[in-house]
Image (cartoon, helix red, strand yellow):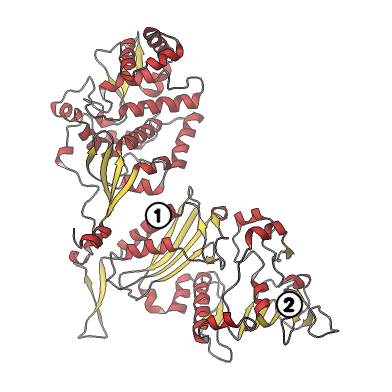
């Protein structure tokens, strides 16, 4: 493997990425870093310590795909400015020998430029014996910046910081066959020794660095990924048996050790449910995120990064980790005072759960009022889950768009919620998800859910027969009056009868399509069948008084000339017509059970026990889009309430 040549960045790129940034970490008297990598070519050595000379970056746009440790060409330049001596020894596989830059008294790289160690001598690197790789030695850091040096802690503290960083990288790379070691100058003992072995696993690396006691209390977080969010995550986390006073958080994004405060806080909040007060977990997370989604140029030391959809990714990782942790949180190892050398595994009593984080409801539970005689077998629920077989490109595009626009966090909330109650029958309801209470615009949620059902069941929607079949023109006329369409009449310059006639003509002209794809059968100017999106609820899936509005809106609200927009518009109007409204008396013409008719006449019952019941769980697979994020608002969180009231 060959290294890319080093080159100076253009002034335009420099001005956009490097203002006011300095390297901060390092030793005090001597810092030496050695590797057995590719080495630095001889011709690149004069550029090693010049500012903004890098092999990683060519143009500013390259930052969108940056996955290396550094990229600006400032690390060695900064060290050369503040160290009394800086030397570089490097050899590539193609070179016959290594080349060494030996400097005394002052840095050989004066202001980043290679100069001779003594007047009259050559400034070129000198050949020397060496192995493949690079060794960089910096001596007496901050000798020319006494204020900065006084700000450093003791040599022991600074060494502890170096050892901490090296240990974390040893854990991350130990399972990839890369060894690391660290020791103090003059000491024969290695404070960190991670041998290079292809058979070493991540668990072996953790055991080597942190000890076997920790490994016994770790569980593996299997890889989880999201194509829509462009990330993959894997890790190891401690169980409830592990206790520490301070959280150990190792997070690598694209193989770079970084701090992600939002992820750390979220995982610590998850652990608060299972750990005693004052105890903290051990967490190692590896995230691979598409480089163009990560902004690496937001912090002087590059220890923090920003990435797209951070909140959604953090919530998905936390939910995945919580699922793994819950499988290992039912027991805790308790040491007995009478037998200090033995441990006993005791089951955790239910009361040991922190009441501040206890979820007291089950979203799978049902109530008696939800039990209404169904007109079909339960097997028909599969019609909701299965997509109809359709090869039309326009329909496939609509289905793909639903998947692409889904909001992961909202999906989890809506599919695993517990319905609390209705605040405003017109549009607002309360639901609970875990320990959080949300205010939901149920009209928006139901309309979007109904639209997804219509697209998913395109060409295979359940039907409801109307007996006797009503007149299409009469229904459109009623819809005209309900919609108060006088403005439409004035804009078109048509009378009410002419508007009704034109809409009826459009529906009749497309009657075959409406029958085949949308379960709306029109014959001799009458509507014989209408769609019902939920198979077990044909009797009251579509409020009968919304039928005139549906037929009227199919005229002006649908683009009948473009196939994809036409199908989307019809599905949207069918969904809009299914939304229960205050004062509606939903019920199809074929309803024959008194209980069903009574329930169907109650919009509140429909909202809770029909629509939201099907959103919850996997029966209907509701995928809320990002655009309705503002219609789901968190109004309370149980741990926050405990902090205020001390009890609930």
Taking 639 as reference, is 201 left or right? Answer: right
Q: Is residue 632 left or right of residue 565?
A: left
Q: Position of residue 309 (x, y in %)?
A: 47, 51
In the depicted view, which residue is nearer to us: 60 or 456?
60
Rendered residue at 74%/70% (across/down): 47
Number of residue marks: 2
Residue at the (23%, 25%) spot, across then down: 586
Disc 1 target residue: 316
- Residue nearest the observer in this picture, 274 or 300: 300
Q: Is residue 497 shown to the viewer in this render? A: yes
Disc 2 target residue: 109
Relative horizontal placement of residue 96, taking residue 603 as reference (left or right):
right
Residue 364 against residue 299 in the figure, above or below: above
Quick check: 244 above or below 427? Answer: below
Q: Nearer the viewer, mark 2 or mark 1?
A: 2
Instruction: Answer above or below: position of 609 versus 291.
Output: above
Q: Nearer the viewer, residue 158 or 615?
A: 158
> If you read the primary sequence from the N terminus, does the residue marked by circle 2 or circle 1 appear first?
2
Gap in angstroms between the C-alphas marked 2 and 1: 48 Å
* Residue 70 x %, y %: 62, 66
Residue at 17 percent of width and 23 percent of height? 592
- The image shows residue 191, relative to residue 392, as above or below, that is below
- Circle 2 packing at 10 Å, graded few (<14), some (14-19), many (20+), is many
Snapshot quadrant of residue 484: top left
Can you tell which mark lies on residue 576? none
Q: Helix or strand or loop: what does disc 2 sit on?
A: strand
Residue at left 26%, top 71%? 332
Label 1, residues with CA under 10 Å away: few <14, some 14-19, many ≥20:
some
Q: Position of residue 301 (x, y in %)?
A: 56, 68
Query: What secondary structure is found at the residue carrying circle 1?
Result: helix
Which quarter of the rendering shows the N terminus? bottom right
């Amino acid at each position: 493997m060959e290294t890319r040549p080093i080159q100076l960045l253009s002034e335009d790129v420099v001005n956009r990425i490097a203002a006011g940034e300095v390297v901060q970490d390092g030793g005090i008297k001597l810092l030496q870093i050695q590797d057995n990598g590719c080495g630095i070519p001889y011709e690149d050595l004069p550029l090693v310590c010049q500012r903004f000379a890098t092999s990683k970056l060519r143009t500013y746009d390259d930052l969108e795909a940056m996955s290396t440790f550094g990229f600006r060409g400032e690390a060695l330049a900064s060290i050369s400015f503040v160290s009394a001596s800086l030397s570089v020894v490097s050899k590539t596989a193609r070179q016959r020998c290594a080349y060494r830059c030996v400097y005394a008294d002052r840095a050989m790289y004066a202001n980043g430029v290679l100069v001779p160690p003594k007047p009259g001598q050559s400034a070129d690197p000198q050949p020397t014996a060496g192995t493949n790789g690079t060794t960089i030695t910096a001596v007496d850091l901050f000798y020319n910046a006494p204020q900065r040096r006084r700000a450093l802690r003791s040599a022991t503290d600074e060494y502890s910081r170096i050892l901490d960083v090296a240990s974390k990288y040893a854990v991350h790379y130990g399972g990839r066959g890369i060894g690391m070691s660290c020791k103090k100058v003059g000491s024969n003992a290695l404070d960190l020794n991670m041998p290079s072995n292809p058979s070493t696993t991540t668990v072996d690396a953790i055991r080597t660095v942190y000890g076997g006691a920790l490994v016994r209390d770790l569980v593996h977080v299997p890889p989880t990924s999201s194509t829509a969010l462009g990330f993959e995550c894997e890790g190891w986390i401690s169980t409830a048996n592990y206790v520490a006073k301070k959280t150990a958080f190792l997070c690598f994004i694209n193989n770079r050790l970084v701090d992600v405060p939002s992820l750390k806080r979220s995982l610590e909040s998850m652990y608060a449910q299972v750990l005693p007060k004052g105890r903290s977990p051990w967490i190692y997370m590896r995230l691979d995120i598409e480089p163009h989604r990560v902004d690496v140029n937001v912090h002087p030391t590059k220890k923090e990064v920003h990435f797209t959809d951070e909140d959604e990714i953090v919530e998905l990782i936390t939910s995945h980790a919580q699922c793994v942790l819950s499988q290992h949180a039912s027991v805790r190892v308790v040491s007995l005072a009478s037998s200090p050398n033995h441990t006993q595994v005791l089951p955790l009593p239910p009361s040991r759960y922190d009441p501040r984080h206890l979820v007291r409801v089950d979203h799978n539970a049902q109530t008696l009022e939800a039990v209404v005689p169904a007109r079909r077998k339960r097997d028909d629920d599969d019609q909701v889950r299965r997509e109809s077989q359709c090869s039309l490109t326009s329909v496939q595009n609509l289905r793909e768009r639903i998947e692409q626009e889904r909001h992961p966090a909202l999906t989890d909330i809506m599919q695993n919620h517990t319905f609390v109650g209705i605040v405003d029958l017109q549009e607002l309801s309360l639901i609970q998800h875990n320990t959080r209470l949300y205010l939901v615009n149920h009209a928006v949620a139901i309309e979007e859910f109904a639209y997804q059902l219509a697209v998913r069941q395109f060409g295979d929607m359940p039907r409801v027969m109307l007996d006797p079949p009503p007149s299409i023109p009469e229904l459109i006329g009623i819809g005209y009056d309900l919609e108060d369409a006088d403005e439409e009449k004035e804009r078109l310059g048509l009378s009410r009868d002419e508007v009704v006639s034109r809409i009826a003509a459009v529906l009749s002209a497309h009657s075959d399509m409406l029958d085949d794809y949308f379960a709306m059968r029109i014959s001799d100017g009458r509507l014989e069948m209408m769609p019902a999106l939920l198979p077990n609820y044909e009797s009251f899936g579509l409020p009968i008084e919304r039928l005139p509005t549906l037929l009227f809106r199919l005229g002006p609200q649908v683009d009948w000339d473009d196939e994809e927009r036409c199908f989307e518009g019809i599905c949207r109007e069918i969904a809009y017509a299914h939304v229960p409204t205050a004062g509606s008396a939903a019920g199809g013409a074929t309803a024959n059970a008194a209980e069903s008719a009574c329930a169907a006449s109650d919009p509140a019952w429909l909202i809770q026990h029909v629509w939201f019941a099907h959103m919850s769980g996997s029966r209907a697979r509701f995928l809320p889009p990002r655009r309705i994020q503002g219609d789901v608002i968190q109004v309370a969180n149980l741990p926050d309430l405990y902090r205020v009231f001390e009890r609930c």
